[in-house]
Image: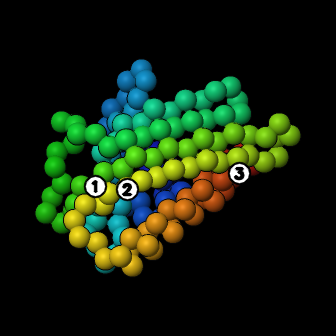
């Protein structure tokens, strides 16, 4: 699935996921993420994704409760997230600007060193998103 391919290339903690539902304005996603040595975390989120012309993409996501996804099993903790990005191509078509925000409550007890490690890794998602865009453009 296209969603899983993108997530695997942009977030190394992504384990599995799927698009649960699509309507006129939003997509409902489920994803499971791993941060050893913790139990996996899963998230259910609704995302608004808008492409403005050919040079700008905006996505904003927020955790939601959904009957489409039952509560996780015993070895998984359901977290809460708010995230989004803006990708804007420069006029010359040779570069782009990425603005990314991500706030996650992993729920449960998490040692400080793991919180710091995960936060620094999430910051690297900007680089991975830009690399994904470059690779996608070069394959066209």
Can residue 9 be seen here? The reply is no
- Residue pushed farthest right? 92
Badge number at residue 54? none
- According to the picture, the residue beneath numbered tag 1 turns out to be 79
Q: Residue 28 location in percent, x, y?
A: 35, 36
Residue hosting label 2: 104
Q: Secondary structure at mark 1?
A: loop
- Please report contact status of discs 2 and 1: CB closer than 8 Å, yes or no: yes
Seen at 22% across and 37% down, the residue is 66
- Rounded to the nearest angstrom, the CA distance separating label 2 from label 1 is 7 Å
Above or below 95: residue 19: above
Q: Which comes sooner in the sequence, label 2 or label 1?
A: 1
Mark before the other along the chain sequence, 3 or 1? 1
Depicted 73 relative to depicted 56: above or below: below
Instruction: Indicate the secondary structure of the residue bearing disc 3.
Output: helix
Compared to residue 103, the image places residue 85 above or below, namely: above
Residue 11 location in percent, x, y?
49, 59
Pointer 2 local density, CA inside 10 Å: few below 14, some 14–19, many at least 20 = some
**Residue drawn at (46%, 52%), measured in percent from left and top?**
102
Q: Position of residue 135 (x, y in %)?
A: 69, 52
Q: CA distance from mark 3 to mark 2?
A: 27 Å
In x, y percent, where is residue 134? Answer: 71, 51
Rendered image: mark on residue 134: 3
Return the residue nearer the eye: 135 or 60. Answer: 60
Q: Residues within 10 Å of mark 3 (few under 14, many from 20)?
A: some
- Sequence-first disc among 3 and 2: 2
Q: Residue at x 15, y 58 (%)?
A: 73
């Amino acid at each position: 699935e296209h969603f899983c391919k993108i997530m695997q290339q942009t977030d190394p903690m992504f384990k599995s996921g799927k698009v649960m539902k699509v309507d006129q304005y939003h997509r409902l996603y489920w994803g499971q993420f791993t941060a050893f040595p913790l139990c996996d975390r899963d998230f259910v989120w609704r995302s608004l994704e808008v492409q403005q012309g050919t040079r700008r993409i905006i996505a904003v996501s927020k955790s939601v409760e959904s009957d489409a996804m039952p509560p996780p099993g015993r070895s998984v903790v359901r977290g809460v997230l708010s995230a989004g990005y803006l990708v804007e191509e420069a006029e010359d078509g040779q570069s782009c600007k990425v603005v990314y925000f991500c706030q996650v409550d992993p729920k449960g007890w998490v040692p400080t060193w793991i919180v710091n490690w995960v936060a620094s890794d999430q910051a690297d998602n900007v680089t991975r998103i830009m690399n994904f865009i470059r690779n996608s453009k070069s394959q066209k």
